[in-house]
Amino acid sequence: PLPGMKLFQAGSTHAWLGGQPPLDLIVTLDDATSDVYSMFLVEEEGTASSFRGLHETITGKGLFSSLYTDRGGHYFVTPKAGGEVDRDNLTQVGRALSELGIEHIPSYSPEGRGRMERLFGTLQQRLPQVLRVKQITTIETANRFLASPYIGEHNARFAVPAAEAGDAFVPFLGDLADILCSKHERVVGNDNCVRFEGRVLQIPEQRHRRHFVKVTVLLHHYRDGSLAIFHGPRRLADYSADGELITREAPKRTAA
């Protein structure tokens, strides 16, 4: 297969930083070459870490054809434990992949997971020692080191040439942040506010409309915690992670 045809994404819980509680290492890997495109530590694997891995991969390489993952709850809805995934009921990650045109392949067999398990076995033997020698003790410092130089050094040692020349990556054109985010429908209250996870988000008056009471809007929750409210294609407002309205300066007019 060509690079970019099928990628794997998975997490491994391990004591990556010596003497500290276990963390999750999230890796996105190419099936054709074993090249790692994204690798970072988080306290807990989930939707946000999946989005981060996808963002780093797509911005670095481009769009790819398919993503192979386990059936964890942030990847798939599985009505019956150990059973088939629900293809009609998408998670936030599944919805984002659908918007990007990337096929999402669920793992049903131990053989399918073997590639990532072997990789994590290698990393568990090597990476904690490397981080200890480098005296790296925080997630932030570790992730800077993993991004550069560690991924490059790992790929130079363990990646293999593709069987065929070329690749299947396609350049991405558009706003990736507004795809790789959580999206939630909300009905605007009588006070012209949207409520989300304890925050009360006041919609400012728009030039084309004074209020949106009883209107269904779409709330985007971004990886950094910030939020935005949309009505159709129109972006009504942006908010900080704590729900404060972010005021945008009007563009300055230039003299004719």
Image (tube, grey):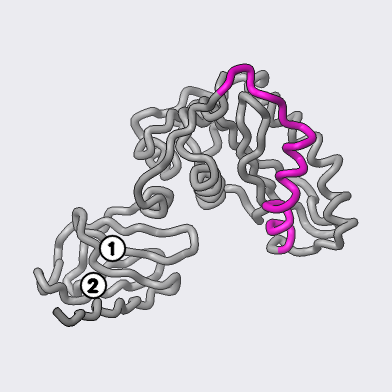
Tell me how far mark 1 sits from mark 2, CA to CA: 8 Å
Q: Residues within 10 Å of mark 2 (few under 14, many from 20)?
A: many
The magenta stretch spans which residues?
Answer: 141-165
- The residue tagged 2 is 203
- Magenta stretch: includes residue 164: yes
Question: Where in the figure is residue 231, as x and y percent of width and height?
Answer: 20, 58
User: Which residue does the image show at 56% across and 50% down from the upper left?
Assistant: 49
Q: Nearer the viewer, residue 11 or 55?
A: 55
Furthest-front residue in this view: 256
Q: Nearer the viewer, residue 223 or 47?
A: 223
Q: Which mark is residue 229?
A: 1
Image location of residue 236, percent across then percent down: 23, 66
* Residue 106 visible in the shown view: no
Residue 34, quarter of the rendered image: top right
Task: State whether the magenta stretch is mostly helix, strand or loop.
Answer: helix
- Residue occupying image coordinates x 87% and y 56%: 132
In which quadrant will I find the C terminus?
bottom left
What amino acid is labelled 2 in the image? Ile
